[in-house]
């Protein structure tokens, strides 16, 4: 049965791994995410070896269409965040197919 | 920003932390996400985004150079969906609907 991990699971892992209080472990997990966010907002790529790369891509404006009504709607230029998984991560995920873990 | 720079920023923000510990914290966060995905689990970080695994069925691919067909096995790919809050921040803080 697939589970969903949240911040508290990550804090718990940090708590187990490093000798800090639970509160501080939670604050540090948040800080890691904030630093990644900050770099992306500065339009920096975030490259985490053996995990993947987060990068921001600027998308031009275009005319979209509401698929239900067929009505044309302008879509403004915007930025989107892309995550490109590293080969290590992809291999890690596929290695477990053979060991029988269910996909999410 | 690369991992060592992220570690340096964490170490700077928490001066009482040993550099080695800052490194372990950063590694633990991403290793734990990777481990969850390898288990077939999802990771949901509100405001940041959610990581999940999508299954891609086996298919017959083609070598684009030779046109030869090749069997491609079933596989799973990690997928990241940007959180609403982060998506809005990237677009100046007030853009977009979910």
Image: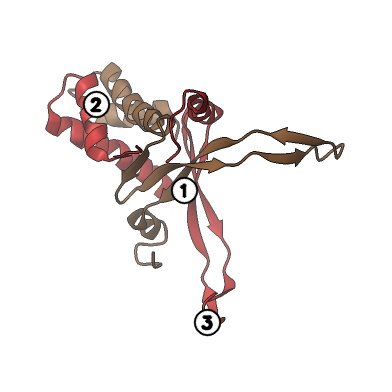
Chain colours: A red, B brown
- Looking at the image, residue B26 sits to the left or right of residue A93; the answer is left
- Please tell me which residue lies in front, B9 or B33: B33
> Measuring 32% from the left and 39% from the top, which residue is drawn there?
A3
- Please tell me which residue lies in front, B98 or B5: B98
Residue A69 tag number:
3
Residue B65 image point, x, y percent:
85, 38
Q: Are marks 1 and 2 on the same chain?
A: yes
Q: Which residue is mark 2?
A: A14
Q: Nearer the viewer, mark 3 or mark 2?
A: 3
Q: Alpha-carbon neighbours of circle 2 within 10 Å: few (<14), some, or many (≥20)?
A: many
- Please tell me which residue lies in front, A56 or B35: B35
Q: Earlier in the sequence, mark 3 or mark 2?
A: 2
Real-space Cα separation, disc 3 to disc 1, in angstroms: 36 Å
Name the chain under label 1: A
- Looking at the image, residue A49 sits to the left or right of residue B20; the answer is right
Q: Are marks 3 and 2 on the same chain?
A: yes
- Please tell me which residue lies in front, B45 or A21: B45
Secondary structure beneath dot 2 equals helix
Image quadrant occupied by the C terminus of chain B:
bottom left
In this rendering, the answer to whether A99 lies above or below B60 is above
Name the chain under label 3: A
Name the chain under label 2: A
Q: Which residue is mark 1?
A: A43
In this rendering, the answer to whether B22 lies above or below B13 is above
Q: Alpha-carbon neighbours of circle 1 within 10 Å: few (<14), some, or many (≥20)?
A: some
Real-space Cα separation, disc 3 to disc 2, in angstroms: 49 Å
The reply to whether residue A82 is visible in this rendering is yes
Q: Earlier in the sequence, mark 1 or mark 2?
A: 2
Residue B80 image point, x, y percent:
45, 45
Secondary structure beneath dot 3 equals loop
């Amino acid at each position: 049965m697939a589970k969903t991990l949240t911040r508290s699971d990550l804090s718990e892992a940090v708590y187990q791994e490093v000798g800090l209080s639970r509160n501080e472990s939670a604050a540090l997990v948040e800080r890691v995410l904030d630093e990644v966010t900050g770099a992306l907002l500065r339009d920096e790529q975030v490259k985490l070896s053996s995990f993947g790369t987060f990068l921001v891509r600027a998308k031009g404006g275009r005319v979209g269409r509401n698929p239900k009504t067929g009505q044309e709607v302008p879509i403004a230029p915007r930025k989107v965040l892309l995550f490109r998984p590293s080969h290590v991560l992809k291999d890690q995920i596929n290695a477990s197919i053979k060991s029988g873990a269910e996909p999410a | 920003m690369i991992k060592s720079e992220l570690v340096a920023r964490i170490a700077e923000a928490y001066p009482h932390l040993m550099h080695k510990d800052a490194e372990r914290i950063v590694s633990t966060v991403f290793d734990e996400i990777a481990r969850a995905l390898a288990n077939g689990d999802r990771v949901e970080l509100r405001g940041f985004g959610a990581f999940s695994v999508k299954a891609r069925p086996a298919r017959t691919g083609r070598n684009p150079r030779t046109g030869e067909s090749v069997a491609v096995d079933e596989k799973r790919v990690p997928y990241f969906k940007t959180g609403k809050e982060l998506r809005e921040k990237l677009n100046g803080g007030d853009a977009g609907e979910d």
